[in-house]
Amino acid sequence: MLDLNTTVERNPSQLDCELDGEFVLMCTETGKYFKLDKVSALIWQLLETPQTGLAISSKMQESYDVTEEQCNQEVLRFLTQLADKQFINIT
């Protein structure tokens, strides 16, 4: 089960490409694509190294005017989407 204390990392079998400031991800195992907006792309960049959801949320709060609760919820929601689509691994 994924929660904010879970450490996650990028799935090494995925590909990413930056296009006009946005990222597009492709999982080579499933063939699924995922387009990231500016905020999601920042989370993706933070996942260059294994991170917990709390660490990501803390870094996002430094960059955006958002409450801790809202940021935690949004980070967890996005990480869950990435995990469901096999773009990240739970470590």
Image (tube, rainbow, N blue to C red):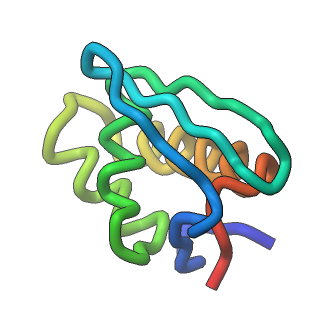
The quarter of the picture where residue 11 lies is bottom right
Q: Nearer the viewer, residue 86 or 70?
A: 86
Q: Nearer the viewer, residue 18 or 72?
A: 18
The quarter of the picture where residue 18 lies is top left
Question: Could you tell me which quadrant the C terminus lies in?
Answer: bottom right
Q: How many marks?
A: 0
- In screen coordinates, is 77 left or right of 58? right
Relative height, residue 26 to residue 15 (above, below): above
Percent across and percent down for residue 24 are 51, 29
Percent across and percent down for residue 13 are 64, 63
Q: Nearer the viewer, residue 57 or 39?
A: 39
The quarter of the picture where residue 51 lies is bottom left
Percent across and percent down for residue 19 are 34, 19
- Residue at the bottom extreme of this rendering: 91
Residue at 35% x, 73% y: name it: 49
Residue at 72% x, 68% y: name it: 2
Percent across and percent down for residue 56 are 36, 59
Q: Nearer the viewer, residue 19 or 47?
A: 19
- Residue at the top extreme of this rendering: 20
Question: Could you tell me which quadrant the N terminus lies in?
Answer: bottom right
Residue at 46% x, 73% y: name it: 52
Residue at 28% x, 58% y: name it: 58
- In screen coordinates, is 52 left or right of 66? right
Relative height, residue 70 to residue 79 (above, below): above
